[in-house]
Amino acid sequence: MAKAMLIDVSKCTGCRACQVACKAWNDLPGEVTTCLGYYDNPPDLSPNTWNRIAFYEIEREGGQVAWLFRSIRCMHCTDAPCVRVCPTGALYKDPLGFTAYDESKCNGCGYCTQFCPFHIPRLKDATVWGKGKVAKCTFCQDRVVNGLIPACAQACPTGAIEFGERDELVAEGRARVDTLKAKGYDEANLYGKNLLGGLGTMYVLTDPPDTFGLPEAPSGALAEVWQLQTLGGIGIAVGATALGLLINWLIARKQIKVEEM
Amino acid sequence: MNATKISRRQFIKLAGTATGSLLLPSSAALAAAGWLNFPLHKPVGEAPSICCFCAVGCGLIVAADAEGKRVINVEGDPDHPINRGSLCSKGMTLSQLNTVDGKVNPRRLQKAKYRAPGSSSWEEKSLDWALDQIVQRIKTTRDKHFISQDGGGRTVNRLEAIASLGGAALDNEECSLIVKAMRSLGLVYIEHQARICHSSTVAALAESFGRGAMTNHWCDIQNSDCVIIVGSNAAETHPVSFKWVTKAMEQNGARLISIDPRFTRSSAKADIYARMRSGTDIAFFGGMIKWVLDDMAANPGRYNMTYVTEYTNMSFLVNPEFETATENDGKFSGFVPGADPNYGKYDKSTWTFQKDEKGIILKDKSLQDPNCVFQLLKRQYARYDPDTVCAITGTDVETFLKVCETYARLTGPVGKAGTIMYAMGATQHTHGTQNIRAYAILQLLLGNIGVAGGGINALRGESNVQGSTDHALLYHILPGYLSPPVATQTTLQEHLDAKVASFATADPKSASWWLNYPKYYVSLLRSWYGDNATEANEFGYQWLPKLDPAANYSHIALFEAMAAGVIKGLICWGQNPAVGGPNSFAERQALQKLDWLVTVDLWETETCAFWQEPGVDPADIQTEVFLLPAAASYEKEGSIVNSGRWSQWRWKAVDPVGDAKPDLEIINELMLKVSELYEAEGGAAPEPITRLRWKGWYDASPLPRGAESLVDLVSREINGWAESQINNADGTVQYEEGKLLGSFAHLRADGATSSANWLYTQSYNEKDGNRQKWRDNVDYHPAGIGTYAKWSWCWPLNRRIIYNRAAVDLDGNPWDPEDFVIKWDPTLSDGKGGWAGDVPDGGWPPMNMEGTRYPFIMKPEGHGHIFGPGLVDGPFPEHYEPLESPTIHPLSGTQHNPAIKVWRPDEIGTPDEYPIVATTYRVTEHWQAGQMTRNLPWLVELMPQMFVEMSEELAAEIGVKNAELVTVESRRGSIQAVAIVTKRFKPMQVNGRLVHQIGMPWHWGFQGLSVGDSANKLSPHVGDANTMIPEYKAFLVRVKKGGL
């Protein structure tokens, strides 16, 4: 039942249609950038850039150069650390599998930005008292819920970004890995099938994950500890009841002050 | 569950099932509270359009706000058979052409502007005021400089003092009216982007196969067994083409070969990457041709020898006096040196075929005769062994051999197909036409033309550059590739006789379709001059401007004439030569010589603002400048033709911004005013203007011929109609007066029909209506090869793969029964037989049947040209070094193409001073001269600055670190750019010496959101021998640490 995206880097041409599609659908402004000696831009995710292509220039054995491209965006972990630590329920797991976001609930505490093992959510306007909001890929939740596919997946010219049933995409990802291995990519692998309960953004990689800046073993353990300590038994069971929200919010406010000291 | 609309009720149910999973803290509660119901925050859009950037022709859907004023969303059209909902980064920004942050893009032109002589600023004006002023300037200049007769006393009716430039981004209907207007004013300097991007393609493909266009189309790439991308970086410049390359690789197991000086985003996807020094394609492909010829001798079973002997001119016997470049130190027989003995012209009297007494060409199908084309080809390329080739190209021999073997093995056998995708890296050389010829010869040798997954796919770079070429915004053609008259052809009959003689054939199996030329010519004149075109006045032939047969009016010549003061006024339709022109610094200086300049554009480009360039004092410049605001692609409607010849309609989605208008309305109003003025005041040669079918026609109310709008009228006019009733032979009515024609086969030379472009006759007919609007995306082809015959319409006659009669054997059975294009079906037509599949390229029966014709119907002899005597610089491609080269020619004493014209010999750099090879290119995120992308914030974010890419080795040599500023200098000028130091460039061994190469995008200029130096300040004013396409892609520079 869960939806997912499968990003096959072997099919990605680095055209960055997905990067602009994300901005276009989500009405995000262009950032002011400079050329930093490579094609990547903006150089990092930001509140106004939820998806970006990173370019990796490597030399393989025998001196053959390779140019790899990876779309960096929210991984939509099944067991999402950001959801665990979000005190307000702004971040939550949608039944369709993605890590959904309700900006109206975000209090800008920034925990998600600290606990995400992939360093994805970014705070816009880091004012402590009330104005800050986090931003990240929402899986184009309004499109998906209304029968459209996410803007990035629709835009992708080569089918490198596929959207669909997670189970089917896992099977397809495995088949793609086999094909790549047969083509000589001995280290081809499917990334994200089981990590953090299974990622909603999975990758078919031609090379080991660290080549693409991906952790081999991303962990949500810290978030779990945090959640148990901070939220106690309340958050898990009751979730976003009014009482829980209030308590979470108060605790969060307190904590953020401590943290920033 | 599919991603269909989910009701709130379903949601709650789904949420309920999820509560058991670990750590989904509150989804049930949230869902119960109704917080998961997300309406779309904006509509997706409904108005279909076609992207205005490259010529893939991707479909868009555009959403406007409730008032139809601002664009709120643009995305790919999921129904479109080519892009299927996807777009590239440029296409995805298209909403910003109109709207940024909910308001009109602040950089869009919304008012007409005027710059007075010597002024340092613009004044805002009304469009009407500007048009009145422009019309006055046109008339003054025309009346003063009109040439009625040439020195020989011949009527020429031409005007050299005004030039028209640009139009590749315009709709067909706009191009059609601009050509009609400009020719009627007497202009001969009519040029546009096609000259400087693919003119060499048109010349080479027309010489090789008969037509100058991409042979197949985008979706057909999926049928390929092996794809070569050379002189192109399709993944970056035609990103959606990679949907089809990827499909071929994934579903067909196709291999991808990338041949490029730089490892690109296309190379990144390739199975084989071969590095090649810029400007050495003929050495590389000549080497491949030699490899195939040698292999053919050893393993003929691996090739389609029937195709080679029956469908190409390989078996033709050539004049025994003919000498290849091998025998003649790099030149072919007949070279006549000029004042500088390195350059001259060919006397082509030995480049002929032997004929029998009836005039039929002699053949030796055993291919053994020493004068047959096969043997000559072997002789021509005998020198192109792998070691010699690689010493020229800088490729490593092992990789070169792998390319040869892979391509020949995968695409040579019967039923296999390979395609070559190329663009400016191939065309923009002093031997650009011959580069493409080399690809054509290889493809004919391997039987790859006419078949699915085969062909030569010229990737055209502007959304309608195919259409603007078809409609002839070029000095040397009239619409539909007819010829403008030259001064020596003093009557219509002389012109037609000369043309028909050049297509004559004695062979009854030759269709030689161009023999129909007079019908198309008279129909064009009838369309332009309406009822004023009569047999008695040669259908208005004398009103057409006659070219000086010795003159060249192409892009470089145009700017040289401007620099020399010959051209006084320029009308520029969306072209930006101040950035995109070769030696653009010189072209900017030439603009200063103009009395007046009109630009019609969406933006303030470097061209219209040349007097504001930093370092230039406006007080010194007396040029008056008029800037007219134009509507963007989806702010108007009309048709455009993609690279694969599909003419697609785009509908209007929103109103133009401010006072902006479609170019169609601007040219119409301009010519109405010109006509009024000439009717009122007279002047030099008023007839070509006052007798034109314009005033009283395009402003009639209601519009003539039942047209709904001006664009509809012009679209009908392009197709053509019966000007008077036409009867069949049996006396029955074929067409009543005014009825739209169904085929160009119905056009006539007697004045009974009109068509503004014969190639488009059928596009808008009585039975089907406007077929360019067709949007049925079902693939009706019986083999499922993806022709999408009811999606839009393509020329000629909706034939999706041209030369497809070469895709079958002599009995009409397809070489590839699975992915066939056409096949002969004896059961069709009541047992008489007929072709199934795509529209056949000539409906005649197969070669083994009575009444057949050879498959290359546009060539007088009906065969594909391996020996191509029609070009000016040789029947075979011979490697020459670019005008600026780092090495002495290793193969012969003929360093450069000997048939070129060198315009500025004192501006040519030498390797002792400028040791580094440079080339230019585009990136995905910007487009052409940059005005359409450097004003869009999302694209400027992605590629914010002018840069230069260089190898780590070169950077170390000059002490430059990544991201530092460097200065690049050529003999023409200097620019600064950010260094991108990369592993993707490597120094090469060329002729025993280490040679560095660098590369630069050419998108930048001094106007826009993102500004930077223009790479074309460095490129030379020298052109290809056949078409004068500039040599942008190989020149010499030096690089220094630090900016200017």
Image: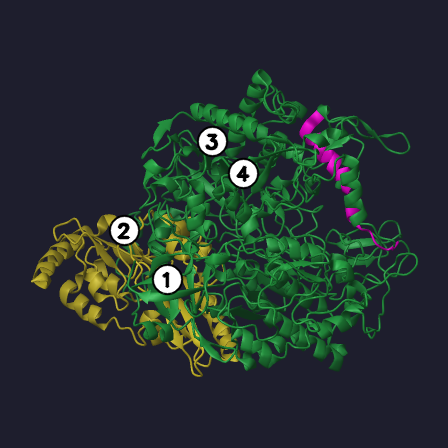
Chain colours: A yellow, B green
Please tell me whether mark 2 sits on a helix, a strand or a loop: loop
In magenta, the rendered stretch is B507-530
Chain ID of residue with mark 1 = B
Chain ID of residue with mark 3 = B
Whether the residues at callouts 1 and 4 have beta carbons within 8 Å, the answer is no
What residue would you read off at disc 1? Answer: B968
**Inter-mark Cα distance, 4 to 2:** 56 Å
What residue would you read off at disc 4? Answer: B164
**Inter-mark Cα distance, 3 to 1:** 40 Å
Q: Nearer the viewer, mark 3 or mark 1?
A: 1
Residue at 53% across / 69% down in the picture?
Answer: B258
Which residue is at the front of the view, B309 or A166? B309
Whether the residues at callouts 3 and 1 have beta carbons within 8 Å, the answer is no
Chain ID of residue with mark 2 = A
Whether the residues at callouts 3 and 2 have beta carbons within 8 Å, the answer is no
Chain ID of residue with mark 4 = B
Q: Are marks 1 and 4 on the same chain?
A: yes
Please tell me whether mark 1 sits on a helix, a strand or a loop: strand
**Inter-mark Cα distance, 1 to 4:** 32 Å
Residue at 55% across / 82% down in the picture?
Answer: B398
> Residue B741 falls in which quadrant of the image?
top right
Disc 2 residue type (three-letter): Asp
